[in-house]
Amino acid sequence: MATVILPPAWKKWTDGETCLELESQSVRELLRSLQQRYPDLAPHLQPPNDNTRLAEGLAISIDGEIQQGIFGKLSPASEVHFLPALGGG
């Protein structure tokens, strides 16, 4: 199962979870699993009515490598980090 690390700011949508394990073979499948498990998180993962890309300002790192898009493959030992854009100035 892939280890998924969620940003601490997302706790309010994930019942306090920031680290979990999910069975997924691709980023796309992982996104679907997260959206089903945490429906309030869905709009922060992908734009409404568009399951072909990530939400604006969101990146994913798989095993330390930043991924472009949602079509990356996962292995059972993958570690996936969701990286929202930082604001400020």
Image (tube, rainbow, N blue to C red):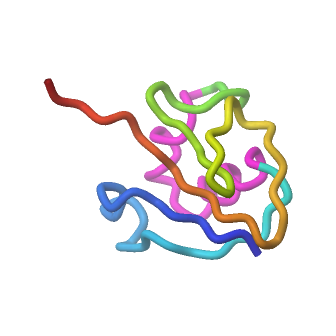
Viewer-nearest residue: 23 or 84: 84
- Quarter of the image where the N terminus is located: bottom right
Q: Quick check: 51 above or below 31? A: above
Residue 53 placement (x, y as % from top left)? 66, 28
Say if the magenta span includes residue 34: yes
- Percent x, y of residue 71: 80, 37
Q: Which residues are magenta?
A: 27-48
Drawn side of residue 46 relative to residue 40, left or right = right
Between residues 13 and 4, which one lies in front from this camera angle?
A: 4
Is 54 magenta? The answer is: no
- Residue toward you, 63 or 13: 63
**How far across and how far down the image is residue 79, in percent?**
65, 64
Q: Residue at horizontal 30%, vertical 55%?
A: 9
Q: Quadrant of residue 44?
A: top left
Image label count: 0
Q: Quadrant of the C terminus?
A: top left
Q: Is residue 14 left or right of residue 77?
A: left
Q: Main secondary structure of the magenta part?
A: helix
Residue 69 picture location, percent across and down = 70, 30
The residue lying furthest to the front in this view is 64
Query: Which residue extends farthest left?
Result: 89
Residue 53 drawn above or below residue 35: above
Up-down relation of residue 15 to residue 67 (above or below): below
